[in-house]
Amino acid sequence: MISARRLIVLLVLASGCVHAKIPPLEQYRLRIPDTSITSLALPDGDGHEVRPAGDLAIVPYLAPGLYGSRGIVFRIGESQYGSYPNREWAVPVSTMLGMITEDLLRSRPVTLGPAVFDPPSPHSYTYIWRGVVRELEEVDRASEVYAAVRLDARLVRARDDSIMWVGSARLERRVPSGTMPAIVDALSRLTTEAILQLVDGARTTLAHPTVGAHNKKP
């Protein structure tokens, strides 16, 4: 299975023949799994959770290198990277992740006000969510296929750009069937879980600001 995938990519990239048959274009999207939607909301407040006043702007995630292109990234082993020429994201990664973050923050808010993705003036909001893609790829190891996601994020106070919270989440999971739909489904689930980890970390810090105060430089 893995050898065939590598062969398709190598043949398409190496072929210089203008009459070579190009595989049909496949487009995919990251999305929150339907089974997770009903379990995302926080339980009814019991008076113990404190959310700060204000609202939150989510800017498009930074997606450096291959992650910024439409092609779905794959990694062979630990150091050989590439992207599929005919399998791509229907929407840029930076936008998909921002939209997912907005949806998750609607169910698990960190502020009393709303969280809005890509508003015209982020600095007019109380806080800004800035995310970075570190990993978002298929991983091929020998005869096994995995999906790997690592996202970094920080929450800053908009008026002075001071950092209120910084977090990172990395998840990896084996994909038994190794098909592209299954890989995208695994990436969607891992992305949702990673962003939820980040959101919960930010919410805890904002609810208890003194917890992170000792780690800040004067």
Image (spheres, helix red, strand yellow):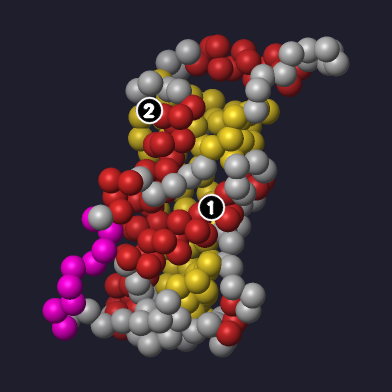
Amino acid at the residue labelled 1: Met
- Displayed quadrant of residue 80: top right
Question: Taking 57 as reference, is 74 above or below it?
Answer: above
In the rendered structure, the answer to whether residue 162 lies left or right of residue 21 reads left
Disc on res. 51? none
Q: Choose mark 1 or mark 2, whichever is in front.
A: 1
In the rendered structure, the answer to whether residue 92 lies left or right of residue 115 reads right
Task: Examine the rendering and report whether any part of residue 151 can be seen.
Answer: yes
| Farthest residue, direction left | 46
90 part of magenta stretch: no
Task: Examine the rendering and report whether any part of residue 213 can be seen.
Answer: no
Q: Position of residue 4 (x, y in %)?
A: 55, 12
Q: Residues within 10 Å of mark 1 (few under 14, many from 20)?
A: some
Dot 1 falls on a residue whose secondary structure is helix
CB contact under 8 Å: marks 1 and 2: no
Q: How many marks?
A: 2
In the rendered structure, the answer to whether residue 88 lies left or right of residue 109 reads right
Residue at 42%, 43% in the rendered image: 188
Question: Taking 130 as reference, is 135 above or below it?
Answer: above
Dot 2 falls on a residue whose secondary structure is loop
Disc on res. 175? 2
Amino acid at the residue labelled 2: Val
Magenta segment, prevailing SS (helix, strand or loop)? loop
The residue to which callout 1 is attached is 96
Q: Position of residue 191 (x, y in %)?
A: 42, 48
Residue at 59%, 77% in the rendered image: 122
Report the span colored magenta: 39-47
Q: Position of residue 104 (x, y in %)?
A: 38, 61
First in sequence, mark 1 or 2: give its number.
Answer: 1
Question: Taking 46 as reference, is 90 above or below it?
Answer: above
